């Protein structure tokens, strides 16, 4: 996939947000991200609406942070992630980020994330926060809306009856591996939609050890004053309302796709593209996992396009103030309605660069 070329600026350290050179950079400031090297293209992909590995979703993967999972799913996943020790990947190459220069010249960093732990994801050196005044995330906390029990007649609760015995067996294996009792796992099959069940269907078994999600890693290396009070682009309740706009039929298509694929293999393919900074290829992997073109389109509209557009006014304020580190799901970057295109249309210079990677053992 094509990436924006950088003019000049070769063979020098990356300029940090404080205007100084950061830790020595392995390579050049503007080395094309495609030159990092990446695994050969994979045939399988990975993600679907609230039942997909959206690198913004895996809803765990969408745009919902791990602690924002619904009810029991949310609690279990958070407790698991909180138990992981921070251990970034080896610094074998740089970490692709986007250097965003506001129309007034202020410098910022935009970094794409996966919202779940995955071994082998290269993490940035703590110096990424050098001189930062803003630490920005999608949202925090959990939605406080009443449970989505519509329709009242329970018609949509019959979705699980369309599953085969083999699909139910796979779901139960993954859900119980994640820590659910058999009774709790089966209770999610009686929910109005597959949304919550899919969070467990996408569980890697055994769970990754000695690693955290990029969200948690970045929060752990951010200065306490920023980490304790991150700035948000949206409210959790609004995101939940957007999620509920995705038709239940789209949830089911993605859920069945999830059960037919190995979550670990899917997530590792997405990880490879994120390590390479190839957001277009990453998008292709994710969209396939929705199970159908219609499901992918519905998800893209409500969970990507409309959210990206809604973020712009807040992003404009932050980026023009400068010295911001903005962390959002990587699926929000590519395409004509992605953040890269939208920011450029609004006069920002968005340049893919490689940031120094953290060493094994963490900061």
Image (cartoon, rainbow, N blue to C red):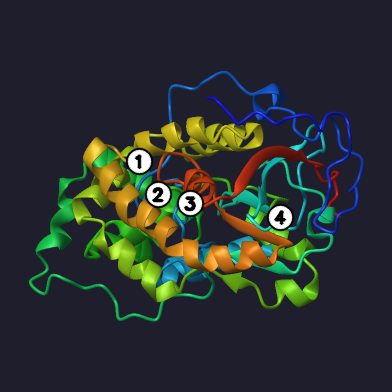
In the rendered image, which residue does mark 1 sit on? 259
- 115 is higher (above) or lower (below) than 131: above
Q: Nearer the viewer, mark 1 or mark 3?
A: 3
How far apart are labels 4 and 2 at the CA level? 45 Å
How far apart are labels 3 and 2 at the CA level? 16 Å
Q: Earlier in the sequence, mark 1 or mark 3?
A: 3
Pointers 1 and 3 in contact (C-beta within 8 Å):
no
Asked which secondary structure carries label 1, the reply is: helix
Residue at point 63%, 47% (across, down): 208
Is residue 142 something one can see in this rendering?
yes
How far apart are labels 1 and 2 at the CA level? 6 Å
- Give percent across and percent down for residue 314: 52, 68
- Give percent across and percent down for residue 73: 44, 65
| Residue 196 occupies quadrant | bottom left
How far apart are labels 1 and 3 at the CA level? 19 Å
Q: Earlier in the sequence, mark 3 or mark 4?
A: 3
In the rendered image, which residue does mark 3 sit on? 56
In the rendered image, which residue does mark 4 sit on? 105
In the rendered image, which residue does mark 2 sit on? 201
């Amino acid at each position: 996939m094509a990436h924006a070329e950088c003019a000049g600026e070769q063979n020098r350290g990356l300029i940090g947000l404080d205007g100084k050179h950061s830790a020595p950079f392995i390579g050049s400031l503007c080395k094309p991200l495609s030159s990092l090297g990446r695994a050969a293209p994979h045939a399988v992909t990975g993600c679907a609406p609230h039942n997909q590995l959206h690198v913004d979703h895996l809803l765990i993967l969408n745009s919902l942070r791990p602690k924002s999972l619904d009810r029991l799913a949310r609690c279990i996943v958070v407790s698991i992630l909180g138990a992981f020790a921070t251990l970034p990947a080896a610094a074998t190459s740089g970490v692709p980020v986007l250097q965003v220069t506001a129309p007034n010249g202020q410098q910022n960093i935009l970094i794409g994330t996966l919202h779940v732990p995955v071994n082998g994801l290269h993490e940035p050196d703590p110096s990424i926060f050098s001189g930062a005044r803003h630490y920005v995330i999608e949202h925090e906390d959990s939605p406080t809306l009443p449970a989505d029990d519509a329709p009242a007649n329970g018609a949509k609760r019959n979705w699980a009856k369309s599953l085969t015995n083999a699909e139910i067996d796979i779901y139960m294996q993954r859900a119980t591996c994640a820590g659910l009792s058999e009774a709790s796992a089966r209770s999610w099959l009686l929910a109005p939609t597959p949304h919550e069940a899919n969070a467990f269907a996408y569980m890697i078994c055994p769970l990754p050890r000695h690693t955290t999600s990029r969200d948690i890693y970045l929060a752990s290396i951010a200065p306490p004053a920023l980490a304790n009070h991150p700035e948000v682009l949206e409210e959790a309740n609004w995101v939940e309302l957007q999620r509920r706009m995705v038709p239940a039929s789209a949830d089911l298509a993605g859920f069945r796709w999830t059960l037919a694929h190995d979550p670990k293999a899917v997530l590792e393919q997405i990880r490879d593209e994120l390590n390479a900074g190839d957001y277009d290829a990453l998008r292709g992997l994710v969209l396939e996992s929705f199970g159908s073109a219609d499901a992918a389109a519905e998800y893209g509209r409500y969970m990507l396009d409309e959210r990206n557009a809604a973020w712009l006014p807040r992003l404009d304020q932050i980026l023009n103030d400068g010295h911001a580190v903005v962390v959002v799901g990587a699926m929000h970057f590519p395409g004509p309605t992605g953040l890269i295109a939208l920011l450029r249309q609004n006069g920002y210079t968005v340049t893919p660069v490689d940031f120094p990677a953290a060493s094994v053992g963490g900061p």
